[in-house]
Amino acid sequence: MQRTMEDDDTLYLRGRVSKLYRKDGKVRVLGTDTLTGQNVEIDADMVVLALAMTPSKGTAEIAKTLKIGRDKDGFLAEAHPKLRPVESVTGGIYLAGAAQAPKDIPETVAQAGAAASKVIALLSQATLNRSPLIAKVRRSHCTGCGMCVEACPFFAIRLEGGKAIVNEALCEGCGSCSATCLRAAIDVKNVTQMQIHEMIEACLA
Ligand code: SF4
Ligand code: SF4
C-alpha cells in the first residue's frame, strides 16, 4: 500500500461513506475521513462496493452433517481461535478457507497446509488416542428414557436392551447428556456431577 501511494500517487482514505449519487456524469461520493475527522467529497469515475461475505448456502447443512459448530455469523467455528485454529470441535474434522471466515488466498493456503499437516499427523499414528473425558452410563440407574440420546449433539448415544450405551469413539465429552438425565445415570468421566458439586462447595466455602 505504501509503495502504491508513493509510486502511483494513490490516495487511500479510511472513512465512512454516507451518500453516493450521480452528478455531471460522475459518481459523487460523500463521507468522512475517520482518521482526520474531515468531510470528504469525491467525484469518481467508478465506485466499487466491497460487499460483506456470507457463508455459502451449504454451510448450515454441512455443519449439521459433520456436527461442527458455527459462529454468530454462520461460518464454521474452530475449536479455539488461538490454540486450535484449524480444528473443529468434532475430532478428525479440520477447517480451511472461507468456510471458516472471510479470508484471502495466501491465508487460505497457509491454513489448508496446517489442516493437511494435522490430517497427516492423525493418520500416521498406529493407534488413535482419545480424550479420557467421555460419558459413562450407570446402567443400574438408567431407565432407557432416551432423553440423553436426543440431547447428544454428536449422536454418540443409542439405546440397546432398554439402556443407554455410549459410543466412546464419537463422544466429545460435552456433558449435555449428563445435564439432561433426570436419573443422574450418565456422567462424564473425571467430571462427574459429584465432583462438580464438590468443586462448587469448595469455591463457596
Ligand atoms: S437420560 Fe438417563 S435414564 Fe434416560 S436413557 Fe439416558 S442415561 Fe438412561
Ligand atoms: S458427553 Fe454425552 S452428550 Fe456429549 S458427546 Fe458424549 S455422549 Fe454425547
Image: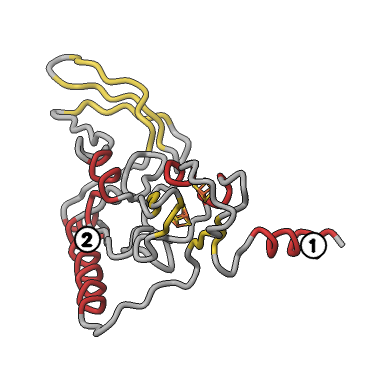
- Measured as percent of width and height from the top left, residue 110 is found at 22, 67
Residue that mark 1 sits on: 203
When the figure is inspected, residue 172 is found, relative to residue 19, above or below; the finding is below
Of residues 135 and 99, which is closer to you in this image? 135
Residue kind at label 2, given as amino acid type = Arg
Residue at the spot 16% in from the left edge and 52% down from the top edge: 8
Q: Residue at x 42, y 60 (%)?
A: 172
Residue 10 at x, y percent in the picture: 21, 48
Q: Residue 18's image quarter?
A: top left
Residue to which mark 2 is pinned:
3
Q: Is residue 110 above or below residue 140?
A: below
Task: Name the spot of residue 94 as percent of width and height, x first.
Answer: 27, 62
| 171 vs 11, nearest the viewer | 171
Q: Which SS class for mark 2?
A: helix
Judging from the image, what secondary structure is the residue with disc 1 in? helix
Tell me the quadrant of the picture where the C terminus can be found: bottom right
Callout 1 amino acid: Cys
Spot occupied by residue 67 in the image (x, y as percentages of width and height): 32, 49
Does 9 sit above or below residue 45?
below
**Disc 1, disc 2: CB below 8 Å?**
no
In the rendered structure, the answer to whether residue 173 lies left or right of residue 56 reads right
